[in-house]
Amino acid sequence: MNFDERYGTLDRLLYRIAFRSGTAQHAMADVEEIMYRDDLESISVDDPVFISSLPRAGTTILLKLLWNTEHF
């Protein structure tokens, strides 16, 4: 099953708007920065933890497990 068969017309349109050019992504990043600036400035990150791996390797579940420990 290919991309066009898996997703409807609106899904495909939104995907193309978001990922075919960096313009939409940069614009959304700017909007998020404005919306959350005050909240983010009040957060202190002393010992950051970076999670990276190959796609579909379980990073989301690892992130959730770490968050649930309440140490992060």
Image: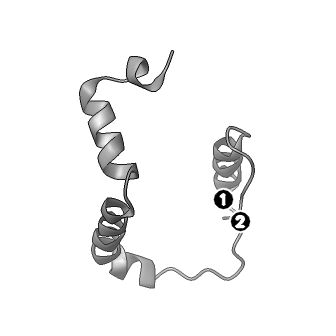
In depth, the one of 27 and 44 nearer the eye is 27
Q: What secondary structure is found at the residue carrying circle 2?
A: loop
In depth, the one of 29 and 42 nearer the eye is 29
Q: Any mark on residue 70, and which? A: 1
Q: Any mark on residue 15, and which? A: none
Apparent side of residue 5 relative to residue 11 in the rendered image (left or right): right
- Please state which amino acid type lies under the numbered disc 2: Phe
Distance in Å between CA atoms under marks 1 and 2? 16 Å
User: Where does residue 53 sit, x and y in percent of width and height?
Assistant: 75, 51
- Please state which amino acid type lies under the numbered disc 1: Glu
Q: Are there few (<14), some (14-19), or many (20+) residues within 10 Å of tag 1?
A: few
Identify the mark nearer the N-term, 1 or 2: 2
User: Where does residue 5 sit, x and y in percent of width and height?
Assistant: 40, 17
Residue at 67% x, 83% y is 46
User: Where does residue 64 sit, x and y in percent of width and height?
Assistant: 63, 47
Q: Does residue 30 lie above or below 57 as drawn?
A: below
Q: Any mark on residue 50, and which? A: 2
Residue at 30% x, 23% y is 8
